[in-house]
Image (cartoon, coloured by chain):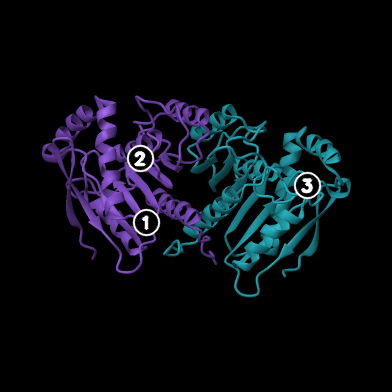
Chain colours: A purple, B cyan
């Protein structure tokens, strides 16, 4: 099983710790993984391992540093503090991309994220970051700083239509925001699927009632389809 | 290259002609293909051949019979005539499924459609037809007879966000209609992509300006992902 190496980085005076891993063979591309509002979890690390096995270098970011939450209540507080200063939040998120570029130069850079991390990849797209593609899994689509300049990455949104945190009005507002800057997005919405559909287990290890096998598998396959289309490799024959 | 066999069928007194083809080996499932408002086209037949090569039996339907249009102007007239009596239209569409079940008994039945054909597969879902899954490619989402009873097939909609025939208001209305009967749908929307994105060529053979390579490939892969999830085969490893 892939081991992760801890790598320190910083945002101003805040010390952060990312998790880094590389495939045994050549690196096809490097993926910044923005985790959930709980920071990295076993679910996020399982996804990261699948990327490494598929030939991608990965870096799992750290939203909080020493103030990392140890339970959902603390995580809500920490997330709201992070989001309360949108420009400072972007600095925090950018620090991780800077580290990724330092660790994995010379390959295409991609970003994915889950929940808060899904919002994070869109914030980096809105921020003008030079990424090839970003994928949000059940991420928040709203922003305090709507895009005003062209967006570089292709965007894939994998969204549960029953996500209580992302109502349809937020979906439409996102399409309008992205349309105004002619962003290149694909939006996948799954009927009856709730927030957190990629994660089989709750933090205490119990089954996650919002987990959806089909949405999880199809969104993950769609991510690889997007990456492979960028990397110039055709979709495998599906026979 | 796969040859199609012409098979006659009828809707009341109207004689219709479908195109049928089967793989050399075992049949994984049978797919009803509802073509465009022009009836079958080289683009539709190319898709049908890909399905046959992937192990599916296919049947391309006939919307019009002897009144088949020979150019887009005639096709618009014929389509509007067909749509002017929604119940009669459903009878016409059902006749093709009856033929598919007769030709290909004992395997799962699926349906896909393009443009008018996309609307057709949704009409068959609304009609209560026993299909495992249906896929609409740049299909119309509106209906004269909204669903009132549970819908059997899983539904995948592959939609160009810039499709002038299917504005966002129609998208939202569709979600609401499907939500009211708890249908199981996946909705894929592609930014800036127009109606007819699956078809590389216009009817005269000239390039189709609405064709979108990425949306075409990714929607086609999503269709196979849906079919394979139903048929109990996991998505192939994407490494």
Which residue of the protein is positioned furthest toward the bottom in this rendering? B25
> Which mark is on residue B231?
none
Mark 3 to mark 2 CA distance (whole Å): 46 Å
Q: Nearer the viewer, mark 1 or mark 2?
A: 1
- Badge 2 sits on which subunit? A
Instruction: Tell me if residue A210 comes above or below residue B130 in the rendering.
Output: above
The residue where tag 3 is placed is B63
Crowd around label 2: few <14 · some 14–19 · many ≥20 (10 Å)? many
The residue where tag 2 is placed is A121
Q: Secondary structure at mark 2?
A: helix
The residue where tag 1 is placed is A106
* x and y percentages locating residue B11 in the rendered image: 80, 48
The residue drawn where x is 57% and y is 54% is B217
Q: Is residue B195 left or right of residue A224?
A: right
Crowd around label 1: few <14 · some 14–19 · many ≥20 (10 Å)? few
Quadrant including the N terminus of chain A: bottom left
Q: Which of B31 and A129 lies nearest the eye of the viewer?
A: A129
Query: Which mark sits nearer the N-terminus, 1 or 2?
Result: 1
Q: Nearer the viewer, mark 3 or mark 1?
A: 1
* x and y percentages locating residue A5 in the rendered image: 18, 57
Q: Is the residue at mark 3 from the same chain as the one at mark 2? A: no
In the rendered picture of this protein, how many numbered marks are placed on residues?
Answer: 3
The residue drawn where x is 26% and y is 44% is A96
* x and y percentages locating residue A42 in the rendered image: 22, 52
Mark 1 to mark 2 CA distance (whole Å): 21 Å
Q: Which of A203 and A36 lies nearest the eye of the viewer?
A: A36
The reply to whether residue A85 is in sight is yes
Mark 3 to mark 1 CA distance (whole Å): 54 Å
- Badge 1 sits on which subunit? A
Q: Is the residue at mark 3 from the same chain as the one at mark 1? A: no
Q: Quadrant of residue A26?
A: bottom left
Quadrant including the C terminus of chain A: bottom right
């Amino acid at each position: 099983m892939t081991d992760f190496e801890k790598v320190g980085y910083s945002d101003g005076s805040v010390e952060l710790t990312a998790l880094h891993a590389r495939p045994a063979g050549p690196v096809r591309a490097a993926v910044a993984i923005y985790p959930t509002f709980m920071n990295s979890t076993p679910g996020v690390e399982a996804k990261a391992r699948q990327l490494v096995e598929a030939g991608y270098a990965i870096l799992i970011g750290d939203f909080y540093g020493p103030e990392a939450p140890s339970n959902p209540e603390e995580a809500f507080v920490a997330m709201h503090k992070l989001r309360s200063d949108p420009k400072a939040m972007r600095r925090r998120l950018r620090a991780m991309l800077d580290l990724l570029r330092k660790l994995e130069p010379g390959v295409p850079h991609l970003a994915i994220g889950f929940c808060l991390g899904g919002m994070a990849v869109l914030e980096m797209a809105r921020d003008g970051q030079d990424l090839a593609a970003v994928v949000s899994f059940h991420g928040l689509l709203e922003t305090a700083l709507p895009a005003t300049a062209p967006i570089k990455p292709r965007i894939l949104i994998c969204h549960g239509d029953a996500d209580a945190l992302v109502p349809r009005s937020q979906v439409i507002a996102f399409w309008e925001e992205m349309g105004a800057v002619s962003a290149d997005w694909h939006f996948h919405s799954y009927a009856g699927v709730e927030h957190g559909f990629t994660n089989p287990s709750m933090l205490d290890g119990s089954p996650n009632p919002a987990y959806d096998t089909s949405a999880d598998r199809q969104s993950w396959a769609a991510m690889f389809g997007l990456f492979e289309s960028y990397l110039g490799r055709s979709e495998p024959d599906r026979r």
